[in-house]
Amino acid sequence: MPGGTASDRRTVSRRETLAAIAGIGGVALSGCVEFRSNASSGSGLSGTIDVRGSSTVFPLMRSMAEEFTADHDDVVINTTSTGTGAGFSDYFCAGTSDFNNASREIRQPEVEQCQSNDVEFLQLTLARDAITVIVNKDADFVDCLTVDELSSIWRTDGAERWSEVRSSFPDKEIARFGAADTSGTFDYFNTHVVGEDVEHTTDYQATEQDNNIRSGVEGNKYAIGYLGFSYYDPEAVKALGVDSGDGCVVPSLETASSGAYGVLSRPLYTYVAKSALKREAVREFARYALKRSTSEPLVADEVGYVPNSPELAGEEFTELNDTIWEVTV
């Protein structure tokens, strides 16, 4: 195939995306990235759109915003990685942002906060992710862990040394790097891996910036971490297979899409405030995001997630248009 295989092109595209995100630096990931195009589209759209929330969804929404503003030069989209929970509590449900990206569904306390501030919302699915457990590339003693073994590493009062996880592992202290408790990835991992009846350990390096998780694991032979698949770089760290009960499965777009990856495969969302849909720029960007959510070149090759099925995107597009009609008549 000219230009290399599809797998080769995906690896290069994702590597370029990771490099671009890393180049933005902490200001972008914890602060704000603004997309404004110099193109002259004559579209007639204008205005500012504020997007907060999940660091996992951030690279996908970043790419969508960049594309959209390339065609609409009078639209500014401010995208800020705050974490799912912080995005809901501090901005979206407080009524100060238009979209909140989320790597889990909105929780009841967040729904109640939104209701108390008269914030009605619509949930839109953007992609599917494989939460990826990573270790150092020199950690040749481990290639796969069961969900129970992962729980033993990440729960409060769990294993402190690798030999406590499995007797054949080295008697070395485990260094943990993971998502902060404001993150939807933290919430999902805590519920589906650590366990609903136990607490996630606080003895780890917590961050909202997935690149810091990756670099922390890269720098310590006995480290372990977890992050969204988009942030996994096979040249820097090793992805572990996970045994959810049916054997060891390595994370990939294919295993996440098929369901073979088990409990660590999850949907990714953005939530849009219904009141914001009264503004034409917000309406068109919401429609655009759903349309682009089915794009394999964008979602899979460039960013590294499983694209929406056309069927799901079509159903949600109909619901979005119905909601737009309700708020604009």
Image: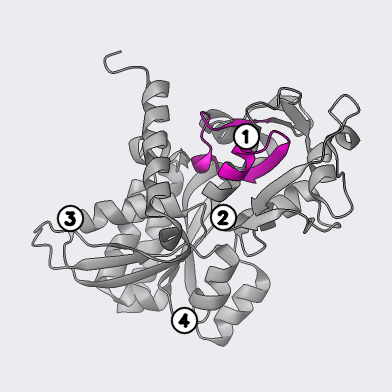
The amino acid on which the numbered mark 2 sits, given as a three-letter code, is Ser
Classify mark 2: helix, strand or loop: loop
The amino acid on which the numbered mark 1 sits, given as a three-letter code, is Gly
The residue segment tinted magenta is 215-240
**For marks 3 and 1 on the same chain, the one whose residue lies earlier in the sequence:** 3
Where 84 sits versus 233, above or below?
below
Judged left or right of residue 99, residue 256 is right
Give the labeled residue for mark 3: 71
Give the labeled residue for mark 1: 259
Badge 3 density bin: few <14, some 14–19, many ≥20, Cα 10 Å: some
- How far apart marks 1 and 2 lie (CA) works out to 17 Å
The amino acid on which the numbered mark 3 sits, given as a three-letter code, is Asp
Please tell me which residue is depicted at 78% across the width and 38% down the height of the picture.
147
Badge 4 density bin: few <14, some 14–19, many ≥20, Cα 10 Å: some
Where 320 sits versus 121, above or below?
above
Classify mark 4: helix, strand or loop: loop
The picture places residue 252, in percent across and down from the top left corner, at 55, 30
Which circle, 1 or 4, is nearer the viewer?
4
Q: Was residue 233 drawn as part of the magenta stretch in this picture?
A: yes
**For marks 2 and 4 on the same chain, the one whose residue lies earlier in the sequence:** 4
Asked whether residue 201 appears in the rendered view, the answer is yes
Q: Are marks 1 and 4 in contact (CB under 8 Å)?
A: no
The picture places residue 221, in percent across and down from the top left corner, at 69, 33
**For marks 3 and 4 on the same chain, the one whose residue lies earlier in the sequence:** 3
In the rendered image, the quadrant that contains the C terminus is: bottom left
Q: Are marks 3 and 4 in contact (CB under 8 Å)?
A: no
- How far apart marks 2 and 4 lie (CA) works out to 20 Å
Which circle, 1 or 2, is nearer the viewer?
2
In this view, the residue in front, 16 or 312, is 16
The picture places residue 25, in percent across and down from the top left corner, at 42, 55
Give the labeled residue for mark 2: 103
